[in-house]
Amino acid sequence: MKKHLQALKDYVANHKKQFSTGIRIGLGVLVIGMLVAMFLYDNSSLKYTYQPVKACDLLTPTEAQDLLGDKVNGVDKNSPVVDGDVATSKCSYSDLNEKAEDMKFVALAVRSAVYDSGVEKNKTEFATAKSNNDVETVKDLGESAYFNKTNGQLNVLDGQKWIIVSYGVKSAPNSTPMSELVSVARKVLK
């Protein structure tokens, strides 16, 4: 038995460099395989059930010009920011009026679900916001809609999206009639 162990030790000692190289190659392949698996796993987590909505895709500069005049300034915070199961995107435009108090604007915030759980979250939080504010229900707009009388915003729940529309004069944003906000919302929902 001692002869066999000594023969194995001698073989390993004579081929130590080959064993070392083989072990290094094996470990290298293992590490690369693990990195590739982690990359593929991380990319699969970016696949949403619903794609986040970009607010400026719903309210384009051309549509803003229809509301504000031929020339508008745009504030494009269009890239949706994902937070858990929802993504928020904002877009706003103003006319070129030099008097800040007379400047007209139109703004859109879109909170879109990226997973089914986000759809439920939008519905729940939309209903809560509606019940906690002084509102007027708007019929025949999206799944559900209400006008917030305090801040002059129109809230619309439509599919996986919760859309908030603001429109008017900057010095008195809550003075715009609900009917004008509904008209803007219909353009957005087209």
Image: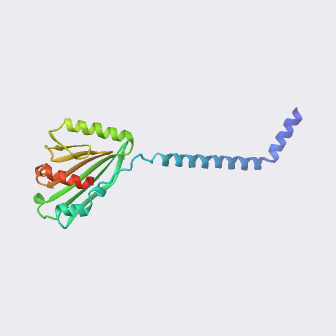
Give x and y (percent) for residue 62: 24, 64
Instruction: Pick the residue in front: 31 or 50.
Output: 50
Give x and y (percent) for residue 86: 35, 44
The outermost residue toward the bottom is 70
Position of the C terminus, as image quadrant, is: bottom left
Instruction: Pick the residue in front: 178 or 129.
Output: 178
Horizontal side, residue 119 vs residue 155: left or right: right
Query: Which quadrant would residue 67 be assigned to in this image?
Result: bottom left
Query: Which quadrant would residue 58 be assigned to in this image?
Result: bottom left
Compared to residue 86, the image places residue 98 above or below, namely below
Give x and y (percent) for residue 167: 17, 54
Position of the N terminus, as image quadrant, is: top right
Horizontal side, residue 21 vs residue 69: left or right: right
Residue at figure coordinates x 49%, y 49% from the top left: 43
Horizontal side, residue 69 vs residue 43: left or right: left
The outermost residue toward the top is 1
Residue at figure coordinates x 26%, y 43% from the top left: 143
Give x and y (percent) for residue 55: 29, 54
